[in-house]
Amino acid sequence: MKESVVQAILGQSVFGGGLGFPLMVVHRDALEHNVATMAAFARGHGMELAPHVKTHMSAEIAARQLAAGAWGLTVATPRQAQVARGFGADRLMVANQVVDPAGLAWAAGELARDPAFEFLSFVDSQAGVDILARAAGSRPFRVLVELGREGGRAGCRTVDELVRVAAYTQRVSGVELAGVAGYEGGLATAQEVRKYLGSLQEALEYVRVRDPILSVGGSEWFDVIGRELVATQARILLRSGAYVTHDDGFYREHTPFNRIEGELRPALEVWAHVLSTPEPGLAIVGMGKRDAPYDDGLPIPRRDGVTVLRMQDQHAYVRADGLVPGELLAFGISHPCTAFDKWRVLPLVDPDYRVVGTISTNF
Amino acid sequence: MKESVVQAILGQSVFGGGLGFPLMVVHRDALEHNVATMAAFARGHGMELAPHVKTHMSAEIAARQLAAGAWGLTVATPRQAQVARGFGADRLMVANQVVDPAGLAWAAGELARDPAFEFLSFVDSQAGVDILARAAGSRPFRVLVELGREGGRAGCRTVDELVRVAAYTQRVSGVELAGVAGYEGGLATAQEVRKYLGSLQEALEYVRVRDPILSVGGSEWFDVIGRELVATQARILLRSGAYVTHDDGFYREHTPFNRIEGELRPALEVWAHVLSTPEPGLAIVGMGKRDAPYDDGLPIPRRDGVTVLRMQDQHAYVRADGLVPGELLAFGISHPCTAFDKWRVLPLVDPDYRVVGTISTNF
């Protein structure tokens, strides 16, 4: 779908016939509520928010996050960094090891071109530091040494190893140590999170830099982070991403706002037609893997008595009684990251489903 | 990634530094081999090929399929029909029930505007026929009545039911019966496919129209289809789609060319960097759910001793020894449909990985 198709019905209802279905919409009020809520949460806990824009890769949403006071933007890859730079961010954090030559060449060039540009990325090995050092230009690459955990993704497995990589970073020219990073998202309990945050703070004591940065991420444990890190002297950069649209699945279950005061609101919704009711109790709906996430829970029908059984490329098998072909159904989603990447443009709607703007994505 | 980025390195290697990674490439020779192979197969078995372009949604690939003699193009939704019409097809088949008002308004308008335009879609209920009838313009909607099966997707569950829907179609103005359609893709054995094709032929005997069409689809059973339907008087429209790029996973296992002479070649390949080797035997690779399919088998490493364990949004966990950060790895994919929809532009490459063109997608 092209942006001009959505622009053409600004002010009109998405159900007025100007747009085809399936259609994913973004609820403006929920989006703006979530942006404001997390900005206030970070401020209230002495943290800075570096929202992870890999979730949406949308200029319109990034602009709202920056306007709400975000430190800068977090991305997952150098390709995303280039795009997010175009969103108007002067500070970018790639929450990842960066080894891609084209991406590093771009970052080195951008650092040289613009003295105000800040660029952070993660390292977890001497080999990774060497790659950055070789690609550096007139200004060094500022890095956070990543602490991981056994069985986890990237990151040094122990504080000792992290300290060695940090020390190596300080001996190599072209790379500058800026602090420590971690990711608590995959942890199962608050106790594990507290222990992990303790290791990050321990690591920070060994990493002797001025104004150190400590970055943690995710949309599941920021309540624990806020409590545990409140007295830390480092600048805390919180990389939450999925909070911005929230969802009706995984994050509805896992948001810290189930434990603390406040709430996030689901901002994404997919509407699709019943195409066929070939057997009693079975409906085939025109919403498939191209339209809605299926990797972390199937779409969540907004109507009682309706269940999504499975999805194919362009279809969902739905269990329900009494549906008829041509009927429109609404679904919440689970996992915002794999919702946005299925769409190039989305209508931003008011509570009456009138189009009040466009949300374009840049994957 | 923008098309101009790929265009800028025409004639150069994708490994020359002009493109970032991860990167999915399309091998031109394999693509053109597959297009020619299936065109010849269909011709040799008295069938016409209506390639399902939902797989790729690419003008450049559709043009090759049309140039090789395709009857027209198959799509899954009216939105895809509009896009495929822009690919230069005068004949479109929506292999699906169409109920979307915006899509039907477009199709009715296009039929009225261009007397040479042919548009086919499926019906499986009186309610579906009524929806088409209400939306019809100056020319009727030509439909194929779909035969499904218990536990399957859409389609009438019995030949009796199909005959009733077909008869209803012939009584309603604005809709014109053109034949019968089915989908054998989900069936497990050649025996089941033969039985199902027999039901389709039986249905065709009851559907009294001039020059009837019989459409079947998929890239798993066209050998059985070719043998079983060779004496059928109807025009056979074969809707295979995934054949065009083939793969190293599901379709490598399931292609009829495992049973008959000939072959398809995998045309898609993803290249990505090792970002981190945080534990012995574990590598974190910069290729995630945004870059390669994960719904019907994980990416297939082209190097022995390397196994993809799992994928997250932007990362793959890979089991392998001896990898180092910065190393590039190649992966074949499983399930072409969920590979193309992750990319807006792909470099078309020669055997030396020089860029010889662009493949743009339109999802």
Image: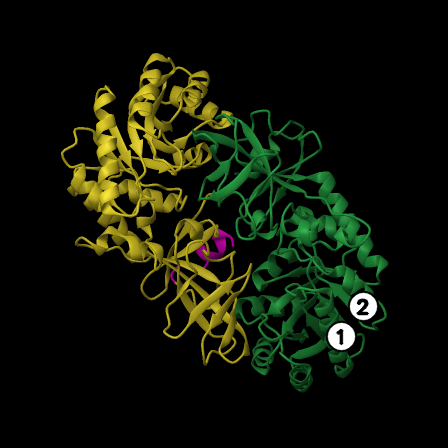
Chain colours: A yellow, B green
The residue that appears at 52% across and 29% down in the rendered structure is: B321
Are there few (<14), some (14-19), or many (20+) residues within 10 Å of tag 1?
some
Residue A20 in sight from this viewpoint:
no
The residue that appears at 77% across and 54% down in the rendered structure is: B259
Residue B66 % position (x, y): 75, 53
For the residue pair A86 and B231, the one nearer the viewer reads as: B231
Q: Earlier in the sequence, mark 1 or mark 2?
A: 1
Residue labelled with disc 1: B198
Chain identifier of the residue bearing label 2 in the image = B
Are there few (<14), some (14-19), or many (20+) residues within 10 Å of tag 2?
some
The residue that appears at 17% across and 39% down in the rendered structure is: A228
Q: Are marks 1 and 2 in contact (CB under 8 Å)?
A: yes
Residue B147 % position (x, y): 66, 75
Disc 2 residue type (three-letter): Glu
Q: Which mark is residue B228?
A: 2
Residue A130 % position (x, y): 43, 18
The residue tagged with tag 1: helix, strand or loop? helix
Q: Is residue B315 left or right of residue B178?
A: left
